[in-house]
Image: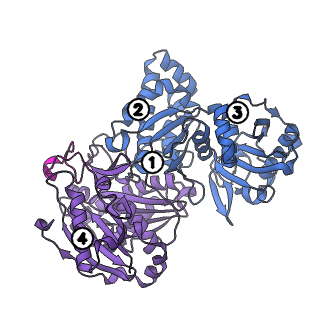
Chain colours: A blue, B purple
């Protein structure tokens, strides 16, 4: 009898579940993440989608040995179980209550799913992406690495001395929320309410807002040599470099991996980011190497799976890279949940 | 036959060595840290002082089971051995070459001492202070703690998920060198050459320079209600709070322990620091607790010793706190080295 593992990716927009055997990813299903009903809705949806992915893979649900969940955060710990809290998926207390459309104070993800599977491991999407990049991507075997998502938000995950940092509530590496200017002054306000946070200065929406166009449009104009776009990209790259340097000053990382939609312009960003980065304290910066994410569009499957994959699969998957031959995703209608 | 351990504290000014048995600290000697001669001078001095402390404790040097070295850093790794590099003790390439008085590029601390003792463990003074505070001080048993020295410089050490962060070269938690204002502008320049680093803004010398008096004098005037001193202390506390918040955003710490000469004014600083700290992202800050260092003046002995102390001594030392009954320090003349 085979061993099967489920990988769950809970995003603010959609939730994807795949089921894998040692040979590769067998099936993948997704739905829009359900944000109405009671706070147990999301765990029930996850459980339903695992069942649906199993059915599609012709695997019995009890054959699932472990479930790895990579999810939008932040977390809170209640009775030793991780819950999701506002913002992103829970509306209560948050600024985005209307936009999210519920008043959940927390989603009891771990409490509701624990016990249904032999093993359950939950981490935020950037922390689990760091695990995936270290096992299968640009960070192969590196004990001191920092993975950074540069996208609609800024998040990160890190290994230090080979140890994955999670923190008291699984909220380590909230890189987007470090303060970049202690004066604060009239710096932009972050989604969390803070001022001059890295995310408020350099994430996709900040770039778009400052220019008055979609971020990708800004990069296209920068490529075409438009001066205003070029100046903005330069400014944003320098701020990101400063944030990355501060993280390295705390973590003494050897490798920084950039992923996410904004970082797809790494060809333009790299020289700008590194130029500013290496000008800081040479003792701390000179041995640091930058790479672009290798897993990138495969992180949805590989982040959750990497959290629970058996050690004896790893070498084989590194060699065969079966995630590249994953099946198409089946979209399940919401009412099936 | 007893088990004996040596604790070494290498500072920019003096180097102290103590020898302990399971009962307590038996002897302690110190000399001014030697900064002339060849780069092997410091390791030789350490070795000499261990011998001198042993003699005073009536212990044979071969009875030393392990040596824990808590030292001024930063480090570089050469052939898998930690070396000290500029600034602080090595003058080469540094701004402070004249002040330090040598042109050493590195001090091969680990290479020269490894093999002379059954076990050798080296960490910077703040990282090893974090170990000591967690074993014997304000951080007893806390798996997610940040220890911060607020003194002539700013440094830190941290545990995340019970793991001590060291990093690729043992340079983790260089908190004094995070950038507090990405504009940089005319912010003060740090000893490392960077601008707007936390250390350049809030360490003792920065406070003294801004006011035009010794830092302790500034706090005394603040206590007497002098407005200018009060405003400066308030400003410095708010900047420190911002730096501590950024560290917590990356490490998800539960406990922050403050030590060092400036933090001796914790009664004044605490309300100012915490007021600013808790105004940042509540999800990340609300469970964080602040404490003042408990080991404080005992860190010189306990930091190095904590790096190598056998696990089965710990509970007994926690109960008896024998470091409080340590003998007087014997000052050894430099020429004896």
Q: Nearer the viewer, mark 2 or mark 4?
A: 4
Q: Earlier in the sequence, mark 1 or mark 2?
A: 1
Circles 1 and 2, Cβ within 8 Å, touching? The answer is no
Q: Which residue is mark 1?
A: A179
Q: Is residue A215 magenta?
A: no
**What SS does tag 3 mark?**
helix
Can the viewer see residue B225 in this picture?
A: no
Q: Using the numbered discs, state the Cα–Cα distance from disc 2 to disc 3 in whole angstroms.
A: 31 Å
Query: In which chain is the residue bearing label 2?
Result: A
| Prevalent SS, magenta region | loop
**What SS does tag 1 mark?**
loop
Q: Nearer the viewer, mark 4 or mark 3?
A: 4
Q: Earlier in the sequence, mark 2 or mark 3?
A: 2
The x, y position of residue B293, in whole percent, is 39, 71
Query: In which chain is the residue bearing label 3?
Result: A
Q: Which residue is mark 3?
A: A323
Any mark on residue B51, and which? 4
**What residue sits 86% from the left and 48% below the top?**
A61
Q: Quadrant of residue A31?
A: top right
Any mark on residue A274, and which? 2
The x, y position of residue B166, in whole percent, is 43, 54
**What SS does tag 4 mark?**
helix
The x, y position of residue B287, in whole percent, is 55, 64
**What SS does tag 2 mark?**
helix
Query: In which chain is the residue bearing label 4?
Result: B
Q: Nearer the viewer, mark 2 or mark 3?
A: 3
């Amino acid at each position: 009898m085979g061993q099967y593992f489920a990988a769950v990716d809970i995003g603010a927009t959609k939730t994807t579940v795949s089921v894998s055997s040692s040979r590769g990813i067998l099936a993948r299903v997704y739905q829009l993440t359900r944000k109405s009903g009671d706070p147990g809705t999301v765990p029930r949806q996850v459980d339903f989608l695992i069942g649906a992915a199993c059915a599609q893979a012709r695997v019995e649900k009890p054959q699932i040995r472990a479930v790895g969940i990579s999810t939008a955060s932040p977390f809170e710990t209640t009775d030793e179980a991780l819950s999701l809290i506002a913002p992103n998926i829970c509306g209560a207390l948050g600024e985005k209550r209307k936009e999210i459309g519920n008043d959940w104070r927390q989603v009891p993800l771990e409490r509701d799913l624990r016990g249904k599977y032999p093993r359950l491991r939950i981490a935020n999407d950037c922390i689990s992406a760091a695990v995936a990049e270290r096992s299968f991507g640009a960070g192969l075997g590196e004990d001191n690495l920092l993975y950074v998502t540069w996208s609609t938000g800024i998040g990160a995950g890190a290994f230090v001395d080979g140890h994955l940092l999670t923190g008291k509530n699984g909220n380590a590496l909230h890189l987007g929320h470090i303060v970049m200017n202690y004066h604060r002054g009239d710096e932009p306000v972050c989604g969390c309410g803070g001022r001059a946070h890295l995310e408020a200065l350099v994430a996709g929406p900040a770039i778009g807002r400052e220019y008055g166009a979609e971020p990708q449009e800004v990069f296209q104009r920068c490529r075409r040599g438009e001066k205003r776009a070029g100046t903005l990209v330069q400014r944003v790259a320098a701020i990101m470099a400063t944030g990355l340097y501060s993280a390295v000053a705390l973590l003494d990382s050897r490798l920084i991996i950039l992923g996410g939609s904004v970082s797809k312009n790494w060809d333009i960003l790299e020289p700008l980011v590194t130029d500013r980065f290496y000008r800081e304290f040479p003792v701390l910066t000179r041995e640091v190497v930058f790479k672009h994410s290798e897993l990138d569009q495969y992180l949805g499957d590989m982040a959750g799976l990497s959290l629970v994959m058996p050690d004896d699969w790893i070498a084989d998957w590194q060699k065969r890279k079966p995630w590249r031959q994953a099946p198409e995703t089946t979209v399940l209608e919401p009412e099936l949940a």
